[in-house]
Image (cartoon, grey):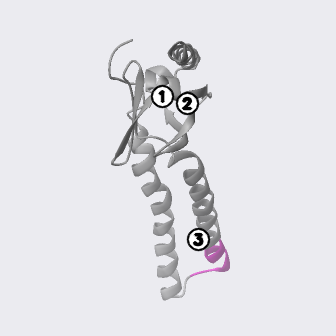
């Protein structure tokens, strides 16, 4: 196994930091338009509903999705042979392969590690595989390879 190979996606930063700015920022433009219409007296009932309720709904749904699925993801994961080096924000931790209880992956390329002991990130760590690794067939292969390496480390 190659030492210190980055296995997490380079797009994690965009997904966690840039995309939410657009998701939560775009409704503000609509609300700015509504304020202008209210001030000039050209606002209609549909404008008020459409420019308040719909963006508010999108903000709430987006907030829930980001909080549950996106923001908990690790920023970077490096495969260092006998351990994984995990970075989330300014914090970094080293997870030995023998401390991993379970490795699971899904169709979107998100890999979740269940650990047998608590770390600074908790006992469950999720990350997005690199683009190459996230291809459906390779993703399955990667997860199986990691499971095999975890079993070998426990022996």
The residue depicted at 63 percent of the width and 69 percent of the height is: 50
Tally the marks.
3
The residue depicted at 35 percent of the width and 14 percent of the height is: 2
Q: Position of residue 23 (x, y in %)?
A: 49, 56
Which residue carries the number 3 mark? 51
> Distance between the Cα atoms at labels 2 and 1?
7 Å
Q: Nearer the viewer, mark 2 or mark 1?
A: 2
Which residue carries the number 2 mark? 111
| Image-based side of 18 in relation to 44, left or right | left
Residue toward you, 21 or 142: 142
- Residue 8: within the magenta? no
Q: Position of residue 49 (x, y in %)?
A: 66, 74
In what element is the residue under mark 1?
Answer: loop
> Distance between the Cα atoms at labels 3 and 1?
37 Å
Which label's residue is closer to the chain start, 2 or 3? 3
Q: Nearer the viewer, mark 3 or mark 1?
A: 1
Which label's residue is closer to the chain start, 3 or 1? 3
Which residue carries the number 1 mark? 129
**Considering the image in quadrants, where does the N terminus appear?**
top left
Residue toward you, 7 or 57: 7
Which segment is the magenta one? 43-49
């Amino acid at each position: 196994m190659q030492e210190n190979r980055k296995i997490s996606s380079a797009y994690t930063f965009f997904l966690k930091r840039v995309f939410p700015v657009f998701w939560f920022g775009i409704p503000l433009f609509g609300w700015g338009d509504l304020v202008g219409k209210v001030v000039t007296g050209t606002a209609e009932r549909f404008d008020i509903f459409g420019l308040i309720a719909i963006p508010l709904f999108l903000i709430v749904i987006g907030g829930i999705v980001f909080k549950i699925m996106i923001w908990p993801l690790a920023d970077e994961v490096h495969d260092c042979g006998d351990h994984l080096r995990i970075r989330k924000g300014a914090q970094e931790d080293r997870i030995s392969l023998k401390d991993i209880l379970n490795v699971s992956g899904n169709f979107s390329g998100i890999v979740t590690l269940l650990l047998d002991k608590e770390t600074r990130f908790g006992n469950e760590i999720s990350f997005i595989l690199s683009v190459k690794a996230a291809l459906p067939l390779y993703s399955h292969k990667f997860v199986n390879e990691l499971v095999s390496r975890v079993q070998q480390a426990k022996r």
